[in-house]
């Protein structure tokens, strides 16, 4: 089946987009007010009082991009020439990029502007700007799509090589020596796009670096020695632990590729690289799972008031409350600051005042009577949904252990990388539900 990396990336991005729309739809149907929780401003000319317009716009934009991607994929399947396929891939990507960036008031303009504003705030290297919950969730979604960034580089490389080979195809075709030289050059150039190398490592690490920057930003804006400051440092360690994992994975690929070409490596060096990779991935996976349960979902409470998060931060405040309180009230922003804000952010971006969040229906009225391992306030029912989410999150966090099995050669399976990305996007989709639900429950508990 013809399913090149160029369209794998697009369909994975669409899967994440449709998943985000499903998040908004389900949360809206369960009574969770997503817009104020995500701290998205409500523009009176484009939004209604409910969240229906939010998820409908996301679905509509995803459908449009999905139709373009599917059309490009089907056309490529019918074309025999690699250059013609490269042209279709390039046209598909350019069309999607133009739709996302076009300034016209059409094709879900508000959603597109919000998306671009979110991405701009995430990549902006600022240590003083406020970090909103919508920025945090989007940056975490980008970390789940980290492999796709390296794949985009491979797409660009393959398209460029296809045009280059076709352009120089007839230069040396008059003699047998010229044909041989052309074939050798073509093989060398194609091998350049099999692995992203150092550039791929940097692109994969970029989303984690963006999220690390957010944690450091929040730490610098927190009170020194406070529980918030400790929490942000502990969170920063989680994202920093991703860098050794990425680098060691690339080092193993480099060693394996060099060994295949005749380069000799000491046996202990190969084993050491593998052992360090296992240790780094194990730490990152288990620590990230702990953080999902203890902080992002705020689960595992006991009747006497102890929480799993107390292992690291004995008394932390809600992340949402901190992010809202740490930003000045609208009345405190001077005229120059308002002008600066209006230049850098779209008018449909994050709120710049402390608005009260609407309450949601919760499952328990008695503070010490709640399902075991959960918390006093939950928005979803029945409780086994939370237990299932914890088990699934753990299993998907440690899916990398399949690489350690001598019976399951996962790297040899067809489209193994694609399916691993699908699994990670599903895990993030599930994570997003409870991440937003936790903020809704905290709002109801304090309101």
Image: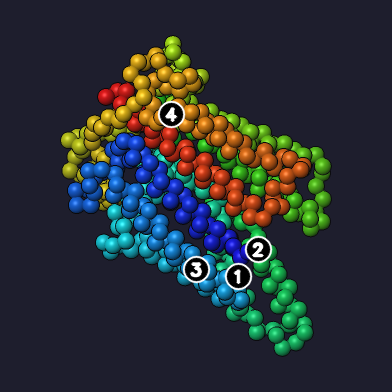
Q: Earlier in the sequence, mark 4 or mark 1?
A: 1
Per the model, the C-alpha gap separating discs 3 and 4 is: 43 Å
Q: Which residue is mark 3?
A: 72
Per the model, the C-alpha gap separating discs 3 and 2 is: 25 Å
Q: Which residue is mark 4?
A: 382
Circles 1 and 2 in contact, beta carbons < 8 Å: yes
Q: Which mark is residue 83?
A: none
Picture coordinates of residue 88, whole percent (x, y):
51, 72
Foreground: disc 4 or disc 2? 4
Please name the residue shown 44% across and 64% down the image: 67
Foreground: disc 3 or disc 2? 3
Q: Quadrant of residue 31?
A: top left
Per the model, the C-alpha gap separating discs 1 and 2 is: 9 Å
- Seen from the viewer's position, the closer of residues 265 and 87 is 87
Residue density around tag 2, few if under 14, some if 14–19, many if 20 or more, within 10 Å? some
Res 145 visible: yes
Per the model, the C-alpha gap separating discs 4 and 2 is: 52 Å
Foreground: disc 4 or disc 1? 4
Please name the residue shown 57% across and 70% down the image: 77
- Seen from the viewer's position, the closer of residues 195 and 99 is 99
Residue density around tag 3, few if under 14, some if 14–19, many if 20 or more, within 10 Å? many
Which quarter of the image is occupied by the C terminus?
top left
Foreground: disc 3 or disc 4? 4
Q: Earlier in the sequence, mark 4 or mark 2?
A: 2
Q: Which residue is mark 1?
A: 161
Total tally of numbered discs in the picture = 4
The secondary element bearing badge 2 is classed as: loop
Q: Earlier in the sequence, mark 1 or mark 3?
A: 3
Per the model, the C-alpha gap separating discs 4 and 1 is: 54 Å
The secondary element bearing badge 1 is classed as: helix
């Amino acid at each position: 089946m013809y399913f090149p990396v160029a369209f794998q990336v697009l369909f994975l991005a669409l899967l994440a987009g449709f998943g985000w729309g499903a998040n908004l739809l389900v949360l809206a149907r369960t009574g969770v007010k997503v817009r104020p929780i995500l701290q998205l401003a409500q523009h009176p000319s484009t939004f209604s009082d409910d969240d229906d317009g939010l998820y409908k716009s996301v679905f509509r934009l995803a459908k449009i991009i999905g139709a373009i991607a599917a059309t490009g994929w089907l056309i490529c399947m019918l074309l025999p020439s690699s250059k013609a396929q490269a042209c279709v891939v390039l046209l598909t990507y350019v069309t999607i990029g133009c739709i996302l960036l076009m300034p016209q008031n059409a094709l879900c303009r508000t959603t597109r502007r919000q998306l671009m504003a979110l991405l701009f705030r995430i990549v902006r290297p600022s240590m003083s700007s406020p970090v909103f919950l919508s920025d945090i969730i989007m940056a975490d979604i980008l970390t789940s799509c980290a492999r796709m960034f390296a794949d985009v580089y491979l797409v660009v490389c393959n398209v460029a090589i296809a045009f280059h080979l076709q352009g120089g195809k007839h230069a040396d075709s008059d003699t047998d020596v010229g044909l041989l030289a052309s074939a050798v050059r073509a093989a060398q150039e194609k091998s350049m796009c099999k692995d992203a190398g150092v550039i791929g490592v940097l692109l994969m690490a970029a989303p984690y670096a963006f999220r690390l920057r957010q944690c450091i930003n929040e730490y610098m804006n927190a009170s020194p020695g406070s529980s918030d400051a400790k929490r942000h440092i502990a969170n920063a360690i989680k994202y920093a632990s991703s860098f050794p994992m990425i680098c060691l994975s690339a080092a193993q690929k480099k060693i394996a590729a060099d060994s295949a070409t005749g380069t000799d490596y000491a046996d202990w060096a190969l084993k050491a690289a593998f052992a360090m990779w296992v240790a780094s991935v194990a730490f990152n996976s288990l620590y990230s799972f702990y953080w999902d349960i203890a902080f992002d979902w705020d689960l595992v409470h006991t009747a006497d008031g102890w929480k799993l998060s107390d292992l690291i931060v004995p008394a932390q405040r809600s992340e949402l409350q901190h992010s809202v309180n740490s930003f000045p009230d609208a009345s405190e922003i001077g005229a120059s600051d308002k002008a600066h804000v209006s230049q850098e952010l779209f008018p449909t971006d994050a709120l710049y005042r402390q608005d009260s969040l609407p309450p949601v229906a919760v499952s328990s009225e008695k503070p010490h009577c709640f399902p075991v391992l959960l918390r006093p306030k939950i928005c979803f029912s029945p409780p086994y949904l939370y237990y299932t989410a914890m088990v699934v999150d753990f299993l998907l966090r440690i899916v990398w252990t399949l690489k350690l099995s001598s019976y399951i050669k996962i790297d040899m399976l067809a489209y193994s990388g694609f399916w691993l990305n699908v699994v990670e996007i599903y895990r993030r989709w599930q994570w997003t539900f409870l991440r937003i639900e936790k903020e809704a429950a905290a709002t109801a508990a304090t309101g």
